Image (cartoon, rainbow, N blue to C red):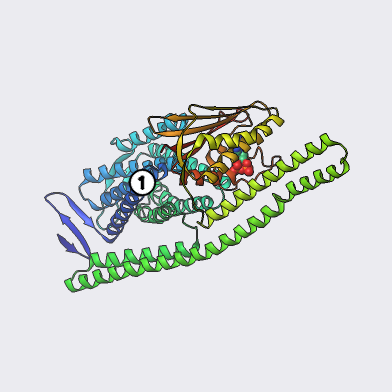
Amino acid sequence: MVERFGYISYLSENVAFHLDFTNIFILTIAIVNAILGFTIYFKNRKSITNLSFFLTLMAVVFWGISVAFFRGFSDKETILLFYRLAFFFGGLISFVFYYFSLAFPYDYYNFNKTQKYLIPLPFLVLAFISLTPNILVIDVQKIPDTENILIFNQYANIIYILILSFYFVLAYYVLTKKYWQFQGNYKDQISRVIFSTSISVIIAFFTNLILPSFGIFNLNWFGAVAVIIMSVSIFLSIIKYHLFNVQIVATEIFVFVLWIFTFVQFLVADYTILKITNAFLFLVMLIAGLLLIRSVIKEVEQRRELTNLNILKNQFLSFASHQLKNPLAVIRGYAQLMLENKDNEDKLINFYKKITNKIDDLLNLIEIFVNYRKIEEKKLDFKFELVNVVDLVKEVSDGIKILAAEKNLDFSFKTSSEKIMVKVDPLKFTQVIQNILDNAIKYTRSGFVRIEIYTNDDTKEVIIKISDSGIGLDKNDKLKLFDQFYRSINVKNYIEGSGLGLYVAKYIIEAHNGKIWAESEGINKGSTFFISLPLS
Ligand code: ADP
């Protein structure tokens, strides 16, 4: 190891590596990014969002290493190799980031055919021109103590920039679209991703692609440092439903800069005493920084909790004023009609039925809201019992038959066995079935509503399938059906509902270790809801 003018150079026989401050910076950030990537990946290996973010970060890591290496090595062939790799990994970032933008923030996502087969094609071109010698990267001029001057083919460079921009533009298009679609936590997460990645992308695009196109290479390391803003920020937004909160982000950036600064101080200290002191300082900063971030997050979370309670209160007030008011007005109307028709027995019976139906609706609605409130306050308790699930479903279905008949819907109930024993909370489970059947009737104008119960002996589950020939679901509905307050735009304005039933249903079924999902061929092609529960 040779030290001169504050630089440290590692020399072997013919390859020398120049570890200046900038390279220490870049490599430290690469290590931090790798740690963040693996943490995210191991946190939830099944999640496509986590996997695609992990891959994006790995591309960032290898890009950073390539940048440090083309800056650090002195052998020309080695430098050229790392320039080619830097171009390749830079392009890879844009490519994987596009898939991340599609998957984020879901755990599961099905890529369509275009996304699977067509969109990767330009990347193959990019990989080819980046990696093959003498296409994009032609030659390099190494000047001591300053950045290399790269000689590259302008045309290949334009193609490269176009392909890379293509993926970034697509990714931001997808993310912005999602930003407008989502609400609440997701919206926060998406805005954080858009904000932080675009800062890093714009910086890196400018310093590593635009400036070099004009022969300016002095800042070609800056992009590899700026990516830290993106990685830390996305990391935090995936790890928790992290808030896009200026106070937290500012603290995180502040602490991070402090860490890197003290760490570099430790690395470059040349006396043992100084090294030990700096190592100690770094450790103190590490702990103090973590405590600081934690306390700021806690404070902001407490504030948010108060806001959430306030929102819940407002939701209840609006629920009481809208959802309850309408059915009560209808009931009042029928009561008036009963008075006006007190001598007509048929009409009286008819109005009486209508009133009881409306009251049942109201009771269900209140039950859903009570459960919703308990879920939000984490106070929903379950009393599990071993029961015959066929009896439970039959009971609800008998009650609902009349409603189906009133709408002239063909109603059927089928079961593969008369007795299927499952451990459930009978009251809550019945509410779920009631809600799904209510929906099936509510969202079906004509045709049928069918219930089927059967067991799957391989997976040891009972499956309750409720299908209808109603208004169906589009792609967007299928993704968000079980979110709180979600209502399809097809129904929002002319069919009453709270948008809470399926959210509560999902919570209850998952508390039973079961699953609930919906399938539909599209709008006006009917829907099928499935509930599966483990057999006892
Ligand atoms: P709501 O009170 O609005 O029915 P839910 O949570 O029960 O609330 O349902 C959420 C949304 O899912 C509904 O607003 C509707 O858009 C859609 N939906 C639920 N069930 C069906 C169904 N059987 N057919 C079509 N759309 C449905």
> Which of the 4 quarters of the picture holds residue 430?
top right
From the top left corner, tell me how far across and down residue 287 is, in percent: 32, 68
Label 1 CB-ligand 1 distance < 8 A: no
Residue 165 seen in render: no
User: What residue appears at the point 64 percent right and 40 percent down from the top-left corner?
Assistant: 489
Count the numbered circles shown.
1
Q: Which residue is mark 1?
A: 54
State the residue in front, 525 or 57: 525
Does residue 209 sit above or below 260 in this rendering? above
Relative to 118, is 314 on the left or the right? Answer: right
Of residue 156 and residue 229, the one placed in the foreground of this image is 229
**Point 61% across, 49% down: residue:** 367
Would residue 307 be seen by someone viewing this image from the given angle? yes
Q: Amino acid at mark 1?
A: Phe
> How far across and down, in percent of the image, does residue 468 sit?
60, 29
Q: Pick whichever, 291 or 60, lies toward us.
A: 291
Ligand 1, seen in the image, is in the quarter at: top right
Residue for point 70% across, 45% down? 359
In-image side of 170 versus 398 (left or right): left
Q: Is residue 471 above or below residue 219?
A: above
- Secondary structure beneath dot 1 equals helix
Vertical order, 352 against 199 (above or below): above
Residue 21 in percent (x, y) is at 28, 61
- Residue at 63% x, 46% y is 364
**Quadrant hosting residue 124:** top left
Q: Residues within 10 Å of mark 1 (few under 14, many from 20)?
A: many
Quarter that holds the C terminus: top left
Residue 44, percent across and down?
A: 37, 46
